[in-house]
Amino acid sequence: MKAGESSDASCEEGPNPRLFPRINQLAKISFFIGIGDVIGGIYTIFGNGDVDMVPLLLIALLPTSVVGAFCGHFACKQIRARRPHQKGKAMAVFGLIGCYVYLGVFFFGFWLLSQYYIA
């Protein structure tokens, strides 16, 4: 092909697969927070022998659960927007489930404590 001739090839460049990390970072954060919240909630309700520490432990894990749910929702949104290049939707969903399970444990724990202190 001579320098003056044009070709039929498009000038557009395809998306760079190295532009984003392979697994979404927010999905990883949500995944590990979800696992930690579930383990911490189970320990707080059933494994801790000191009843006076239970409300403090439940309240201490509440902000991490909220942050994990936030990260999980935004990870799902980012993965949907960057569909062919990012993975980790299962990690984000598992983190969301873990965070919402802990929120259930949180309310269940306070209900148990109300029954304990009333009786």
Image: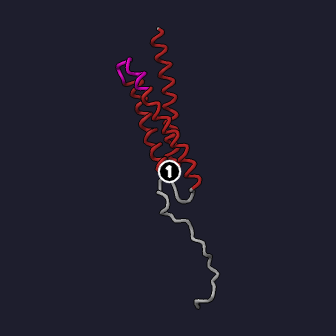
Please say whether residue 54 is one of the residues in the magenta stretch.
yes
Where residue 69 sits: x, y (%)?
A: 52, 38
Say what amino acid the circle numbered 1 marks: Gly
Q: What residue is at 35 percent from the left and 19 percent from the top? A: 50
- The N terminus - image quarter: bottom right
Where residue 44 sits: x, y (%)?
A: 40, 26
Where residue 86 sits: x, y (%)?
A: 52, 56
Q: What residue is at 49 percent from the left and 61 percent from the top? A: 19
Relative height, residue 105 to residue 85 (above, below): above
| Residue sticking out furthest to the front | 4
Q: Secondary structure at mark 1?
A: loop
Relative height, residue 100 to residue 113 (above, below): below
Where residue 37 sits: x, y (%)?
A: 44, 34
Q: Nearest the camera: 6 or 50?
A: 6
**Quarter assignment of residue 83:** bottom right
Q: What residue is at 57 percent from the left and 68 percent from the top? A: 14
What secondary structure predominates along the stretch shown in magenta?
helix
- The range drawn in magenta is 48-58
In the displayed structure image, the side of residue 75 where residue 52 appears, left or right: left
Structural crowding at the residue carrying mark 1, measured as other residues with C-alpha within 10 Å and reported as few (<14), some (14–19) or many (≥20): some
Which residue matches tag 1? 88
Please say whether residue 18 is one of the residues in the magenta stretch.
no
Relative height, residue 72 to residue 3 (above, below): above
Q: Nearest the camera: 50 or 55?
A: 55
Q: What residue is at 52 percent from the left and 40 percent from the top? A: 70
How many numbered circles does the render carry?
Answer: 1
